[in-house]
Image (cartoon, helix red, strand yellow):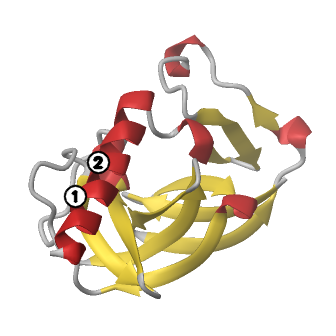
Amino acid sequence: MHLLCFSLMDKKYAVNIDGVREVRRIKEVIPVPGALSFIEGVVSLRGKVVPIINLRKKLGLPTQENKTFHRVLITEVHKHIIGLAIDSVIGVITFDPANIEPPDEVLNKADYLVGVGKSGKELTLIIDLEKLLTSDEKTGISHVHGKVQIQKKV
């Protein structure tokens, strides 16, 4: 399993590399009033409007004081291009499925977790991009796209 490994608060997370289009630095995010709390806003990327999700907020982690995002993973989820704001990229790693444990009862509420990858003493939480957003949140992302598209036409 090939994964793109990244950090949030000095902890390792990873996503399947097949869902990642690119990694970018984003300097300015335009806020969208009424968007979900974890959506920082949108950016224009090659003519497309891309919502930026603050992954710290989405996962319930403490947020940073300054809102500068060091790196953004540009991903395709549910036929939408979305950006995931992260702290830093560690690199591409490969896990043997035998070294990935499924989430236990404590982590079962985190439906977005594929499992926990073990490499020596280090643990990596593996996120399923397809399950990261609930159906209501997917609707919220579509709503953001709709708001921005309407504003562009005016």
Q: Residue at x 62, y 63 (%)?
A: 5
Mark 2 sits on what residue?
143
Front position in the image: 135 or 13: 135
The reply to whether residue 46 is in sight is yes
Residue 20, horizontal then vertical, whole percent: 64, 66
Q: Can you give x and y, in whole percent of width and height, for residue 99 in the image?
A: 83, 40
Q: Secondary structure at mark 2?
A: helix
Residue 147 circle label: 1
Q: Judge whether residue 127 can be spotted in this image.
A: no
Q: What is the three-letter code of the residue carrying label 1?
A: Lys
User: Is residue 152 shown above or below 33?
Assistant: below
For the point 55% across and 17% down, which residue is it?
108
Label 1 sits on a secondary structure element that is helix
Amino acid identity at mark 2 = His
Is disc 1 surrounded by few (<14), some (14 to 19) or many (20+) residues within 10 Å?
Answer: some
- Residue 50 placement, left or right of 94: left
Image spot of residue 42 (x, y percent): 28, 69
Tell me if label 2 and label 1 are in contact, CB under 8 Å: yes
Quarter of the image for the C terminus: give it.
Answer: bottom left
Q: Is residue 81 above or below residue 68?
A: above
**Could you tell me residue 113's position as x and y percent?**
59, 34
